[in-house]
Image (cartoon, rainbow, N blue to C red):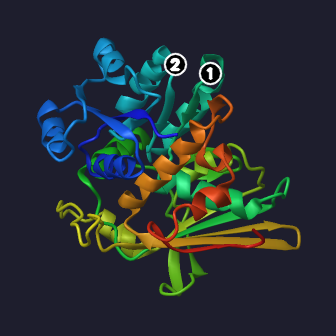
Amino acid sequence: MPSTVTVFGAYGHTGRFVVAELVRRGWTPILSGRNESQLHDLAAGYPGLAVRPATVDDPDALDRALAGSVAVINAAGPFGDTVPALVEAALRAGIHYVDVAAEVEVVAKTVATYQDRAAAAGIVLAPAVAFYGGLGDLLASAAVGDLPAVDEIHLAFALDSWIPTPGTRKAGVASRGRRNGKRLVYTGGELVLRDDAAPTAEWTFPAPFGKQTVVGDFTTADSVTIPSHLKTGALHSYMTPDALRDLASTDETPPQPADEFGRSAQQFLVEVVVRAGDTERRAVAAGRDIYAVTAPIVVEVLSHITSGTQAGLHTAGRIADPAEVLRALLPVHLDLLEIDGR
């Protein structure tokens, strides 16, 4: 049942979508983050919501920000800076923790570090519940279904554009600094740094994207979340090149709202193919605005967490029936959803 939840980074691009979705679903968000002025500007549009500014280097302020909440949603990057402090605050408070981190190394460290402590504290800790890390995990989990293991999982992203937010740009700078100019690749069951060129391949997406030359080894948080609980011999990921060109652009104009929900005009499609022997299954989801769609994913997953998910560290695909979570996003947040055999 909806209750009170703290949103840290509430005034950020994705945080605003999260706050709006929480309110739409009957939750009461507490608005928190590092910039008090921006928090009050946001609160002007939501009369009655509490504003509790806090910084990651002030544990007492974080504790006050989380007081009375059943969970905290961390929407503030770079996540290498915010995740450790917010997770520790959630553990102290004994409340659930969810983040929308897309920084692959940060998500990997979260998964590797907090399982036992989350379970001991009786809370659910859910990293990367977002477009990257969450949607692919849900699709892969739904496609795998009752198969105990698969030989390979292919995860292909088609974006007709990708105008990054200021937060994405900052996260990219942080990630590139950690990688020292190399690219991060998931191979052989682990994340490794490589300095060769990314491969290309051909992928035929459903309409409207069709056949595309895609860039391989496009490593996202899904390369942490998916193999953390699905048994697969290999995981391959791909991205359409137009999106990568946009991402590399020096134009710092942020995404612009283009509909009544504040979503940009960006269209996305994510396709997962899993193979186990002679069995092949697919799952496809399509919609609009990768930042905006993060919000309903977070809130739907949170609703399952607070309904009694077993304590511990769980990715989006493990928290509830993934097909059920995905179908809850229709028809407002997803335009297309197809899952073989489910």
Residue occupying the far top of the picture = 60
Q: Residue at x 37, y 58 (%)?
A: 291
Image location (x, y in percent) of residue 282: 70, 72
Q: Nearer the viewer, residue 26 or 316?
A: 26
Give amino acid for label 1: Gly
Number of other residues with Cα within 10 Å of mark 1, as a class: few under 14, some 14 to 19, many 20 or more: some
Contact? badges 1 and 2 (CB < 8 Å): yes
| Quadrant of the frame with the C terminus | bottom right
- In this rendering, would 281 be left or right of 238? right
Q: Is residue 19 visible?
A: yes
Q: Residue at x 66, y 66 (%)?
A: 154
* Image position of 257 with respect to 209: above or below: above
Label 1 to label 2, Cα distance in Å?
7 Å
Which quadrant of the figure has residue 53? top left
Judging by the rendered image, the residue that carries numbered circle 1 is: 122
- Tell me how many marks there are: 2
Judging by the rendered image, the residue that carries numbered circle 2 is: 94
Image location (x, y in percent) of residue 279: 85, 72
Image location (x, y in percent) of residue 134: 54, 52
Q: Is residue 235 visible?
A: no
Going from N to C along the chain, the mark reached first, 1 or 2, is 2
Q: Residue at x 23, y 67 (%)?
A: 257
Number of other residues with Cα within 10 Å of mark 2, as a class: few under 14, some 14 to 19, many 20 or more: some
* Image position of 57 with respect to 342: above or below: above
Q: Residue at x 24, y 26 (%)?
A: 52
- Label 2 element class: loop
* Image position of 1 with respect to 161: above or below: above
Give amino acid for label 2: Gly
- In this rendering, would 102 be left or right of 75? right
- Label 1 element class: loop
Which quadrant of the figure has residue 156? bottom right
